[in-house]
Image (cartoon, grey):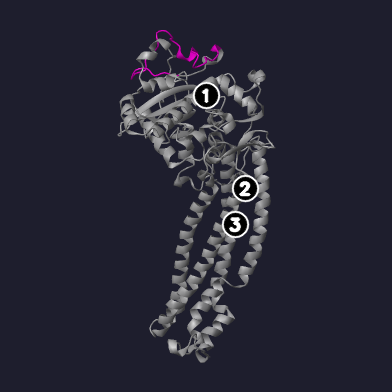
Amino acid sequence: MPGQSKKDVHFKQMFELKSGSKTYGSMDTSYDSSRQNTLSQDHEEWESYGVSQSSTESRPDPHNPHPESSGIFPRESSAHNTHHSVHSDKLTYFRDGRRKIDYVLVCEYSPLGSRSLSSSSHGSTSEKKQVKYENWRSTFMSNLVRAGLHMEKEVIQTVNKKCVSFTKIHAPWPVLCQYAEELNMRAPLQANVNPVLNWSEKLLKSLRIPNLMAQNVPNKPPDYFKGPFKRSKIHKYVGSDNTDTFFSNAERIRIVYEIVSTGVYGEKKKGEVGVDRLVEEGVFLSAFPLHDGSYHVPKDYSDPLNARQVLYEYWARWGRWYKYQPLSHIREYFGEKIAIYFAWLGFYTGWLLPAAIVGLLVFLYGVATMNTNQVAHEICTIGESITMCPLCDKELGCGYWKLSDICGYAKISYLFDHPGTVFYAVFVSFWAVTFLEYWKRKSASLAHYWDVMGFKDEMERPRPEFAARAPFQKINPVTGVNEPSFPKSLRKTRIVAGMGLVFLMISLVFIFILAVIIYRVLVSIPLFQNSALRSFASTVASVSGAVVNLFLIMTMSILYEKLALRLTSWGKSCKNNK
């Protein structure tokens, strides 16, 4: 799933404010064709794909007292409906308090009055584009409804008199089961004992030493032996009688994202598929899943902590930096990929400790033996009697100098260049190899415990930016799917142009290196001519040159990043073949 942008965070904050206030509309009522002539234009947009708005407050439909049983929201079986508990959290559940929000789509539109004014002021091109976007949105939402997803709408009127619509999406139990089987997801078969994954915890426990790194994290997710999910064997899985908790939040989001990322909104042959491309085209402002409630825990809070609060209180805080990471909770909330990353981060940080200790001992050895170093001792003692040649021409102000003038530099250089540093270099080489081998064992253990040994990356879809601007379609010889494509001639032209830009940037690097060298020479010359600053000339030139070099590196890194993004998304200069 794409990463979260600042725009997504902004709309999430708007959604939280909206969900905590009075609701403006409901999409739980079925479509009534007799009301078509009385609805406003913005209501008709939603009714065109089977979703309608009601008044500003949510009221039950007298013709359909159970909105989830309508054609819009397929009703779940009574056996599973009995397990839906009512939740008061408006941020993560529909207004009925039963259906969990799995995904949110955000779009912006103008009310009826402002639309008519804008139609007269803007040209036909803008009108056609708006109509096309509305048709795409209508088709896309209709296909999501046909896929079995439930929807509910919240509307906010912004300062510029435009309406921002938040479409909340819920995947019911039958849809979750169907796609879980298609995605070959795994389901729990039997409970398993949670293993102790930290070797230090085992060691300290065997030595009966108090473990300051341990912490008792509540709501620890149980561990299971798992097998491929099959709808025909649903009753054999642990927890299948509770439809609210059988699929984790990460699994629900994965299923819903699979549906919205493969939903068709136009011509499939042209690659007009998926919510990511709709966001890129501007049809939707944003699309994102929700966190599991607020992370903040009030002082007088007595209810059980949700998963996000547990992670914040026992993991994502500065005061927990020395504690074991709750990998089971991270895996349950974010999934195995993110959990594996943080497992590696903690493992690597722990293994840096012996390397840091040995490095500190080597440095202390250098400090202890600094005065016994023969080279530094001779420079400091007999250096007074040794006269050195000038470092530059006499016309520039350089004169003869004593070898003892560099006594301090000789001692400092010994701290970082003594026999102990050779030992440390050999130690780090063996440390790196040992760390890599032990991480292989650690990752294999985690993959076995988390039942992801046979995990394979999902087929990567074309980027929405590329799909939106690719002028042609071509069948992928591996998957057999018709995908966006660029002709070879255009691709070769862009490769050559990209190589030219890369060569230009490499040339700039050499130019900057030469410029720094010239700068150091120009700075050192007047300093050597000044008798008071002559002893600091080399140091000032080196330090200031390093600062200039750092500034150039930071500036060029920003330029490199922007250039890399532009080169990667260069498909924006092409238009779709209509």
Q: Which residue is mark 3?
A: 354
Question: In front here: 24 or 210?
Answer: 24
Q: Amino acid at mark 1?
A: Leu
Give, as a single range, the part of the protein colored magenta.
51-78
Main secondary structure found in the magenta portion: loop
- Disc tally is 3
Q: Which of pointers 3 and 2 lies earlier in the amino acid sequence?
A: 3
- Give neighbour class at mark 2: few <14, some 14-19, many 20+ (Cα, 10 Å): few
Q: Position of residue 225 (x, y in %)?
A: 66, 29
* Circle 2 SS class: helix
Q: Which residue is mark 1?
A: 144
Q: Position of residue 214 (x, y in %)?
A: 54, 43
Instruction: Look at the image and tell me whether residue 118 can be seen.
Output: yes
Q: Is residue 297 left or right of residue 560?
A: left
- Give neighbour class at mark 1: few <14, some 14-19, many 20+ (Cα, 10 Å): many
Q: Which of pointers 3 and 1 lies earlier in the amino acid sequence?
A: 1
- Give neighbour class at mark 3: few <14, some 14-19, many 20+ (Cα, 10 Å): few
* Circle 3 SS class: helix
Q: Is residue 362 left or right of residue 30?
A: right
Q: Which residue is mark 2?
A: 489
Q: Quadrant for residue 86, please give it.
A: top left
Marks 3/2: CA–CA distance? 55 Å
Q: Amino acid at mark 3?
A: Pro
| Residue that appears at 49% across and 78% down | 408
